[in-house]
Amino acid sequence: MNIKFLSNLYPSESKPFKGTFVRNVLEGFEKRGGQVSLISLHDSSNSKFGKLIDYIQFIWRSFISGLKSREGEIHYVHYTSHSSLGLILASFFKSKDKLIIVSNVHGSDILPEKMGVFSKVKIWISQKILNISTLVVSPSGYFKNVLMTEYGVCNGDVIVSPSGGVDASVFRPSSEVNKEFTFGYVGRLEEDKGIFDLLDAFRLNQLENPQSTLILVGTGSCEARLKEVINSMSGVTMLKGMSQRDLVNVYQSLKFLVFPSKRVSESLGLIPIEAMMCGVPVLSSTIGATKDYIIEDMCKLAFEPGRVEELEVALKVATDMSVNDYLRLSDLALETASNYSSSKVIDDLYRTLKSRLDTRLSK
């Protein structure tokens, strides 16, 4: 397959954490014999004007690529609300059978948390690119249902593939690392990610379990506010965001990961799966696609999003858990996460895309 990836997010030297799974899929396709290339946003400026110029150049390069699209060439779009405008413009000059588009949709592309003017524009762009896409890739079964019921995408046009999966050669358990922290949170430091709910519940848990510890890893708009709250607490450590390989050490040092998100746009949630790949059980809110992998006995540690009292109960159950029960949960986490290994996920996606596109292009 000849595939050109378009993404506004892609790792760079200055921002190595952004869009890592896009790179993983691109490199995975290349290893499987695909002819791959990339058009990404050169997010090199800190000024608003500079960012605008970067984005205009990204749209222009995408537009020209769409216009010059050759027979059999596939444009694979990640983050439809930010990366599609150039191809949408090109589609006015190129028919759907000449401009083959695969759209990989992510949470906020079609389920923004706030419905302002910018969010409405994002939804409009996503709807437009979905209408002209040959195939649509959804990160989860939950999100596939949203695409079908709210955006009119046909069942047969959707492929479910969990965002490049998790690299099992990187994320793995270790018996040599001390479980330094009882609980951990990894992700964006934003209010709708449930981070303050976690701190409130942890404070309550410490009344009965003063030896409990918590580590928070990430960056975001609530960072300064969180530091103020944490300064009045004990047993809480806070670290900046880090690369995937450094995150492994954090996961391995946890007894439990907590995923308290309140975002309906949680189209998958790779962070819980990364932790599970390291043998770490997850305490998760029942939001979005989490029901796809928070299964069996791990459901006993689940809680309604935004319900601090339920989260505190989950923390208490986890703290009081016997060694045998913990080992069983750890085994369940590993078994479940194995379905999301990047080698399996990317291999399945590549084969499915090749089969489906070959069939359609031959008609």
Image (cartoon, grey):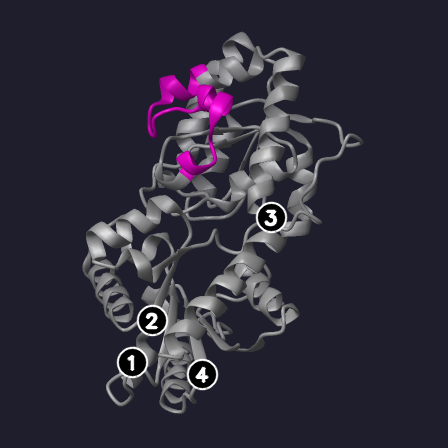
| CA distance separating discs 4 and 2 | 12 Å
Tell me, yes or no, whether the two marked residues, 3 and 1, touch with CB atoms within 8 Å: no
Q: Would you place residue 50 above or below residue 169 in this image? A: below
Query: What are the residue bounds of the magenta stretch?
Result: 290-313
Q: Residues within 10 Å of mark 3 (few under 14, many from 20)?
A: many
Q: What is the three-letter code of the residue carrying label 3?
A: Ser
- Identify the residue at image location x=49%, y=54%: 163
Q: Would you place residue 36 above or below residue 271 in this image? A: below
Q: What is the three-letter code of the residue carrying label 2?
A: Thr
Tell me, yes or no, whether the two marked residues, 3 and 4, touch with CB atoms within 8 Å: no
Q: Is residue 165 magenta?
A: no
Q: Is disc 1 placed on a helix, strand or loop?
A: loop
Q: What is the three-letter code of the residue carrying label 4?
A: Gly
Badge 3 is on which residue? Answer: 341
| CA distance separating discs 4 and 1 | 12 Å
Q: Is disc 4 placed on a helix, strand or loop?
A: loop
Q: Is residue 352 left or right of residue 248?
A: left
- Identify the residue at image location x=70%, y=26%: 179
Q: Earlier in the sequence, mark 4 or mark 1?
A: 4
| CA distance separating discs 2 and 3 | 26 Å
Tell me, yes or no, whether the two marked residues, 4 and 1, touch with CB atoms within 8 Å: no
Badge 1 is on which residue? Answer: 96
Which disc, if any, is residue 134?
Answer: 2
Badge 4 is on which residue? Answer: 72
Quarter of the picture containing the C terminus is bottom left
Which disc, if any, is residue 212?
Answer: none
